[in-house]
Image (cartoon, rainbow, N blue to C red):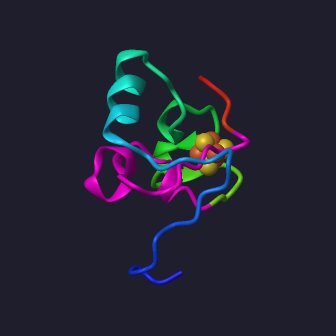
């Protein structure tokens, strides 16, 4: 997909919206690497399993670039 193409969503997916970001903060929804037991801040913020985690990091959800993109939850996420 090039940056000019609109993302394609399945029925179980939706775009990240401002409302989602606001409500996830209000409800203290934890889903980012920083809240996961496998996160390694001492190792440059890598995932213990070596998963590419840029799109699971808190900074990604705090940036404007996430709006309109597919929300991707990590299947291995385990709360601290
Ligand atoms: S298991 Fe998933 S949520 Fe946890 S640190 Fe790795 S990529 Fe992030």
Name above or below for residue 71 compared with residue 6: above
Which residue is depicted at the point 48% across and 36% down?
34
Quarter of the figure with the N terminus: bottom right
Observer-nearest of 56 and 8: 8
On the image, which quarter does residue 22 sit in? Answer: top left
Q: Residue at x 71, y 52 (%)?
A: 49
Q: Compared to 5, does 42 lie above or below?
A: above
Q: The C terminus is located in which quarter?
A: top right
| Furthest residue toward top | 27
Residue pictured at 60% horizontal, 58% vertical: 9
In front here: 22 or 38? 22
Place of residue 67 in the rendered image (x, y in percent of width and height, measured from the top left): 35, 52
Ligand 1 is found in the corner quadrant, namely: top right
Q: Is residue 53 magenta?
A: yes
51 relative position to 65: left or right: right
Residue 7 place in picture, x, y as percent: 51, 67
Residue situated in front as seen by the camera: 75 or 66: 66
Q: Image quarter for residue 75?
A: top right
Q: Magenta span covers which residues?
A: 52-76
């Amino acid at each position: 997909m090039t940056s000019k193409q609109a993302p394609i969503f399945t029925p179980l997916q939706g775009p990240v919206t401002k409302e989602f970001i606001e409500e996830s903060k209000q409800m203290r929804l934890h889903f980012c690497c920083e809240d996961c037991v496998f996160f390694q801040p001492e190792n440059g913020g890598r995932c213990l399993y070596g998963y590419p985690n840029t799109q699971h990091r808190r900074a990604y959800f705090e940036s404007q670039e996430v709006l309109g993109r597919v929300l991707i939850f990590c299947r291995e996420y385990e709360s601290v």
